[in-house]
């Protein structure tokens, strides 16, 4: 008997075939993030509230991506996490309230009935909820980062930790005694992307993205001076006007400013993290965050890739589900 794990986020689709508690195959589907699919499938407003169309749409994509596994293996359950459980996804599964651990998430899985599975009869489908919290009257939500955080904790054999999870919407997650007790989100990645596409900075940032370490450090240093973010962003334009910097210098400078301000905020919320874990796909973004964290006076104690973390978390979830 096998299961399939699907991390179906707003921008990515990743699937993993699990047999006897071990991952034996995996696949990714670029361009199949929920928000990308949603924008394409529901451009006609008349389809927005057509639940039958929506469920069949996502069911057909899942079948297309996992078809070879379904043909060769007896699949018992397909467990999915991420934006696929959002209001833009297959079915809105809502949110668990923090504090929560793997057992809370396992009990809150929404298994699709015959009216919700879009004709997908090859396996039972369970979609995880997201996680929600309220701090000082401010709401926050996340989907898939909760399972990644708990999976990373298991991977390192820890019970407590603080997770920095870079992304379009960056997350800072605090876990105590194996339960997520607090988290908050910042739109660093999305703002960086928007500024590169729209507005007066966009023409200055055209060109192939390349990391320029010195420019990134200068951006970090500017953010550390304590000025307002909006004022600091103007410095990107000012630098271009004052001197002919190549686009990659300005891109790195902008990145340093935004990530630097994110770290300033993190230090105002999180006090002296003992186990600070960087949870990110390895590459330039991961290197930038590690450099920024260290420049803020903190130490990255462990690093783990998103794929490894989500698999660890989902395998733990599957184990709990088998016990119930």
Image (cartoon, grey):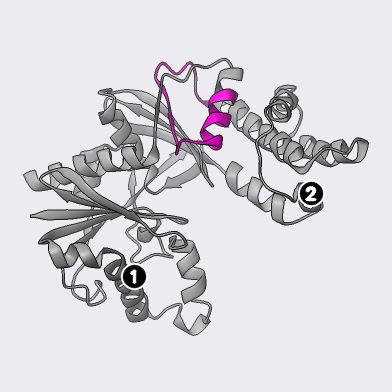
Q: Secondary structure at mark 1?
A: helix
Residue 262 at what x, y percent from top left?
A: 60, 32
Label drawn at residue 72: none
Residue at 28% from the left image edge and 22% from the top image edge: 158
- Give the residue at mark 1: 61
Q: Quadrant of the N terminus?
A: bottom left
Assess disc 2: are there few (<14), some (14-19) or many (≥20) residues with their C-alpha within 10 Å of its C-alpha.
many
Residue 282 seen in the figure:
yes
Q: Which image quadrant for residue 57?
A: bottom left
Point out the stretch of residues depicted in magenta. Answer: 269-291
Q: Is residue 49 left or right of residue 68?
A: right
Residue 324 seen in the figure:
no
Residue at 65% from the left image edge and 31% from the top image edge: 261
Given the current orientation, which residue lies at the most extreme bottom position? 46
Residue situated in front as seen by the camera: 154 or 303: 303
Residue 52 sits above or below residue 20 on the image: below
- Give the residue at mark 2: 201
Q: Earlier in the sequence, mark 2 or mark 1?
A: 1
Residue 132 at what x, y percent from top left?
A: 39, 45
Assess disc 1: are there few (<14), some (14-19) or many (≥20) residues with their C-alpha within 10 Å of its C-alpha.
few
Residue 162 at what x, y percent from top left?
A: 41, 26
Residue 147 sits above or below residue 118 on the image: above
């Amino acid at each position: 008997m096998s299961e399939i794990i699907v991390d179906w986020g707003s921008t990515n689709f990743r699937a993993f075939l699990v047999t006897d508690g071990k991952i034996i195959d995996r696949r990714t589907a670029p361009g199949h993030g929920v928000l990308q699919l949603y924008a394409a499938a529901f451009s006609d407003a008349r389809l927005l509230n057509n639940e039958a169309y929506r469920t069949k749409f996502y069911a057909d994509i899942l079948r297309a991506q996992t078809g070879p596994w379904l043909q060769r293996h007896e699949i018992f359950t397909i467990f999915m996490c991420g934006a696929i459980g959002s209001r833009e996804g297959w079915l809105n599964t809502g949110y668990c309230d923090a504090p929560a651990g793997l057992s809370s998430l396992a009990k809150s899985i929404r298994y699709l009935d015959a009216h919700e599975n879009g004709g997908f009869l090859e396996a039972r489908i369970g979609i995880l909820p997201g996680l929600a919290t309220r701090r000082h009257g401010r709401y926050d939500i996340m989907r898939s980062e909760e399972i990644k955080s708990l999976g990373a904790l298991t991977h390192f054999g820890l019970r407590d930790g603080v997770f920095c999870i870079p992304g379009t919407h960056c997350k800072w997650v605090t876990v105590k005694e194996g339960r997520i007790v607090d988290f908050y989100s910042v739109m660093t990645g999305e703002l960086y992307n928007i500024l590169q596409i729209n507005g007066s900075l966009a023409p200055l940032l055209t060109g192939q993205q390349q990391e320029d370490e010195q420019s990134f450090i200068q951006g970090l240093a500017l953010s550390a001076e304590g000025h307002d973010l909006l004022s600091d962003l103007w410095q990107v334009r000012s630098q271009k006007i004052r001197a002919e910097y190549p686009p990659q210098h300005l891109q790195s400078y902008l990145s340093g400013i935004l990530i630097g301000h994110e770290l300033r905020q993190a230090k105002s919320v999180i006090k002296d993290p003992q186990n600070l874990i960087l949870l990110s796909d390895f590459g330039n973004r991961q290197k930038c965050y590690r450099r920024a964290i260290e420049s803020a006076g903190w130490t990255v104690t462990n690093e783990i890739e998103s794929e490894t973390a989500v698999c660890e978390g989902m395998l733990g979830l599957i184990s709990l589900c088998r016990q119930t």
